Image: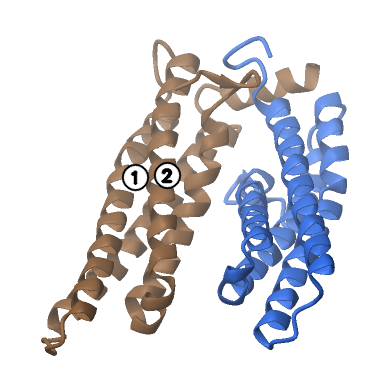
Chain colours: A brown, B blue
């Protein structure tokens, strides 16, 4: 991972992507899971957005680790540690979302190829599980983003780090 | 506009939307401008993206205005605010471009396509509008990030 983009840390830039793409992928996923018509129409689009969401979450995770090392080489403030833990787990939620979307689409492809009408139980169960995974992914991403924003912007943060950064900005 | 959400300033939350959705909508516009075949199926989606992106830009400008007041004198924030103030004039042409592509797609589907010269001209204008919006959102976003983050990893 590069350490900076035009002199600024990568992490606050790269987090924009998962924060928008994961909820977007999750909403599309819920739509295509709930409606087989939409699945036929938007299935591929959902898979592409989910893949982009997964990749962007991974980049955010890598760049977050870099930023942590750059800002806090010795002791990590508690709010940052909270954010790090949530962010480290977020990738598994998004991976679960990606796998659920792939399973849903592959099952659909398989069903369309066959002529015999098989039981609707498997697709229904898979759709329900997918919707639950999608909602969990949204929750986890929002929670992660929230904790990250708090670690930077909350003036009462234990280290006063945000105050330091903002006063630097003011003095320039 | 509320200034904070749960004690955290609202502006840095709202800008996530603009930073991702403007380039995403612009990508959609550029792809539809280049591939007329896809217009009938995806125009609505790209239009919705551009609409949400434009609304987001406006909300970012409004929350930014109040956020700026909490800092006092700061040249970097002034520069960011100046760039941000004109962002909506880049977002609106992007929105217009998505509507033009939708209209071109409808004309073609109803067997009443516009002349190929006009079609190419409008497609080129759409690509120009989309590219300009991306360039401006990068300039706005970078100037804002510079005000907050400069000096944290290198002597920017």
The Cα–Cα distance between marks 1 and 2, rounded to whole angstroms, is 7 Å
Given the image, what chain letter belongs to the residue carrying mark 1?
A
Secondary structure beneath label 2? helix
The residue beneath circle 2 is A144
Which class describes the residues within 10 Å of circle 2: few (<14), some (14-19), or many (20+)?
Answer: many
Q: Callout 1: helix, strand or loop? A: helix
Q: Residue at x 44, y 64 (%)?
A: A45
| Residue A19's disc number | none
Q: Chain of mark 2?
A: A
| Position of residue B80 measured from the top left corner of the image (x, y, whole percent) | 81, 35
Q: Depth check: give the residue in front, B39 or B82.
A: B39
Do dots 1 and 2 share one subunit?
Answer: yes
Residue B153 on image: x %, y %: 57, 15
- Point 38% across, 51% down: residue: A51
- Find residue A37 and report its horizontal and vertical position in percent: 38, 84
Going from N to C along the chain, the mark reached first, 1 or 2, is 1
Residue B47 screen position, x and y as percent: 67, 69
- Of the numbered discs in the image, which one, if any, rests on residue A90? 1
In the image: residue A13, left or right of residue A37? right
Considering depth in this image, is A150 or A50 the residue closer to the camera? A50
**Quadrant of residue B31 within the rendered picture:** bottom right
Name the residue: 64% across, 69% down: B48
Is mark 1 in CB contact (under 8 Å) with mark 2? yes
Quadrant containing the C terminus of chain A in the rendered view: top right
Location of the N terminus of chain A (image quadrant):
top left
Q: Nearer the viewer, residue A87 or B54?
A: B54
Q: Nearer the viewer, mark 1 or mark 2?
A: 1
Q: Is residue A49 above or below residue A122?
A: above
Q: Is residue B152 left or right of residue B70?
A: left
Query: Residue, x 63% and y 64% (percent of image)?
Result: B49
Number of numbered labels in the structure image: 2
Task: Find the residue positioned furthest to the front.
Answer: B116
């Amino acid at each position: 991972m590069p350490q900076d983009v035009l002199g600024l840390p990568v992490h606050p830039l790269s987090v924009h992507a998962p924060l928008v793409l994961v909820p977007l992928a999750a909403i599309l996923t819920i739509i295509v899971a709930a409606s087989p018509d939409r699945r036929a129409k938007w299935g591929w689009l959902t898979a592409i957005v989910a893949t982009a969401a997964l990749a962007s979450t991974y980049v955010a995770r890598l760049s977050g680790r870099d930023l942590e090392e750059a800002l806090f080489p010795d002791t990590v403030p508690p709010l940052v540690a909270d954010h790090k833990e949530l962010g480290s787990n977020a990738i598994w939620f998004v991976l679960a979302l990606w796998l659920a979307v792939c399973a849903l689409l592959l099952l659909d492809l398989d069903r369309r190829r066959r002529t015999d009408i098989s039981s609707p139980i498997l697709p229904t169960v898979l759709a329900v599980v997918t919707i639950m995974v999608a909602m969990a992914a949204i929750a986890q991403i929002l929670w992660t983003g929230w904790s990250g924003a708090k670690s930077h912007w909350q003036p009462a943060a234990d280290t006063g780090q945000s105050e330091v950064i903002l006063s630097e900005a003011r003095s320039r | 506009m509320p200034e904070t959400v749960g004690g955290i300033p609202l502006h840095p939350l709202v800008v996530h939307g603009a930073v991702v959705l403007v380039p995403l909508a612009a990508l959609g516009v550029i792809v539809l401008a280049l591939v007329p075949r896809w217009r009938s199926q995806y125009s609505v989606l790209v239009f919705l993206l551009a609409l949400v992106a434009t609304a987001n830009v406006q909300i970012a400008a409004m929350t930014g205005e109040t956020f700026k007041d909490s800092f006092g004198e700061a040249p970097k924030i002034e520069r960011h605010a100046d760039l941000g103030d004109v962002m909506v004039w880049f977002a609106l042409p992007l929105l217009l471009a998505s509507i033009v592509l939708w209209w071109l797609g409808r004309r073609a589907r109803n067997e009443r396509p516009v002349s190929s010269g006009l079609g190419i001209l409008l497609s080129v204008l759409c690509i120009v509008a989309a590219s300009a919006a991306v360039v401006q959102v990068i300039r706005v976003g970078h100037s804002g990030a510079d005000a907050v983050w400069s000096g944290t990893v290198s002597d920017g």
